[in-house]
Image: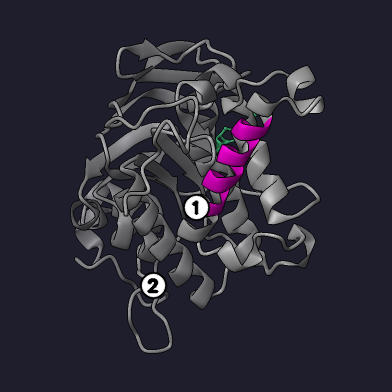
């Protein structure tokens, strides 16, 4: 069964291949600090692209530009033929770019309530029609609820659909955020540290869910994550930022061996650094493993 949205299950957006997301020479300054310095990269349609870098490298700033919270001093963000720079966050969301945040921002209520919040952007029935329970509005609400349930299944939350979010485990609450973002039927999903604070089992489960979501829904994913195990497992391509500059692009294997990347993470020149990116004290570029030694 295809879980891609149809007009029946996802009023408001037709299934289509996601367009390319292009970040072109984006610069952001805060007072005297250049948080992003002519940053460019492209998220290929349907790919998982990771944006990594040490603390303060500019990853969240980049997400804030992409989702419309920050306006860059110069440069452009384009989604296919559309220019996103300068648009308000809700316009960017309506064009198909949804995001999650580092910190959980679920509201009170059940999983279903939270997911239905994500469907509001796609609602056509007005407030009055919904309040008066006009047949058209009721039909639309039913279709949205059915789609929210499908997305709960896809994200491993089906058994918790009617459960108050406050009663969920930390890992499940983080996945409610992901599911709510998916309820916007995005073409590009921006995930800001989706496994931060999770234990090994929760991280492995979330990695599986991201993999499934990408495959089933055919969307592009831009991932900011410090967990290199997750990045190495999921990403097709990686862009590395350091002090607001792009220092490397490539496959996960290419960037983990890149001398500039090793220097940024380890603070040592590439030549002196062991080829696998390891030191006696370990590195942020090592993959984390579960109790059986498998990458999570
Ligand atoms: N609103 C702001 N005002 C001033 N400086 C800011 C603001 N937001 C971020 N910065 C600065 O911009 C730089 C990039 O920060 P950013 O949060 O984007 O980095 P990051 O790579 O996401 O870091 P982390 O991995 O710690 O989340 C940092 O030096 C940060 O202190």
Residue 29 x/y as whole percent = 55, 19
**Residue at image x 39%, y 65%?**
208
Pinpoint residue 209: horizontal percent, then vertical percent: 43, 60
Residue 150 is marked as 1
Magenta segment boundaries in residue numbering: 138-150
Give the image location of residue 7, x and y in percent. 42, 30
Task: Give the quarter of the figure containing the N terminus.
Answer: bottom left
Q: Is residue 162 in sight in this rendering?
A: yes
Corner quadrant of residue 163: bottom right
Q: Was residue 140 drawn as part of the magenta stretch in this picture?
A: yes
Instruction: Indicate if the residue with disc 2 has its beta carbon within 8 Å of ligand 1.
Output: no
What residue lies at 53% left-to-right and 38% top-to-bottom?
99
Residue 296 tag number: 2
Residue 82 vs 104, above or below: the answer is above
Please name the predominant secondary structure of the magenta segment in the image: helix
Give the quadrant of ligand 1: top right
For label 2, the SS is loop
User: Is 163 one of the magenta-colored residues?
Assistant: no
Residue beneath the point at 38% across and 62% down: 230
Residue 65 in the figure: left or right of residue 296: right
- Per the model, the C-alpha gap separating discs 2 and 1 is 26 Å
Is 160 positioned to the left or the right of 196 in the image? right
Q: Extreme bottom residue here?
A: 292
How crowded is the residue under tag 1: few (<14 C-alpha within 10 Å), some, or many (20+)? some
């Amino acid at each position: 069964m295809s879980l891609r949205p149809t007009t029946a299950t996802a009023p408001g957006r037709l299934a289509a291949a996601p367009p390319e997301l292009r970040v072109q020479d984006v610069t952001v300054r805060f007072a005297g600090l250049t948080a992003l310095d002519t940053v460019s990269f492209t998220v290929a349609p349907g790919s998982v692209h990771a944006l990594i870098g040490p603390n303060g490298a500019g990853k969240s700033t980049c997400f804030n530009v992409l989702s419309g919270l920050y306006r860059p001093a110069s440069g452009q963000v384009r989604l296919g033929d559309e220019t996103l720079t300068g648009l308000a966050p809700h316009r960017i969301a309506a064009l198909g770019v949804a995001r999650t945040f580092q910190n959980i921002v679920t509201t009170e209520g059940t999983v279903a309530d939270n997911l239905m919040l994500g469907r509001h952007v796609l609602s056509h029935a007005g407030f009055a029609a919904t309040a008066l329970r006009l047949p058209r509005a009721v039909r639309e609400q039913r279709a949205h609820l059915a789609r929210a349930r499908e997305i709960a299944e896809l994200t491993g939350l089906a058994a918790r659909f009617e459960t108050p979010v406050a009663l969920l485990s930390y890992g499940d609450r983080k996945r409610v955020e992901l599911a709510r973002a998916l309820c916007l039927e995005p073409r590009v999903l921006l995930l800001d540290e989706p496994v931060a604070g999770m234990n090994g089992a929760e991280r492995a489960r979330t990695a599986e869910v991201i993999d499934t979501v990408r495959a089933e829904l055919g969307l592009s994913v831009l991932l900011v994550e410090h967990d290199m195990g997750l990045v190495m497992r999921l990403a097709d391509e990686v862009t590395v930022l350091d002090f607001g500059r792009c220092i490397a692009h490539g496959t996960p294997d290419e960037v983990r061996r890149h001398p500039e990347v090793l220097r940024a993470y380890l603070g040592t020149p590439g030549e002196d650094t062991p080829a696998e990116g390891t030191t006696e004290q370990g590195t942020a570029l090592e993959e984390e493993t579960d109790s059986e030694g498998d990458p999570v």
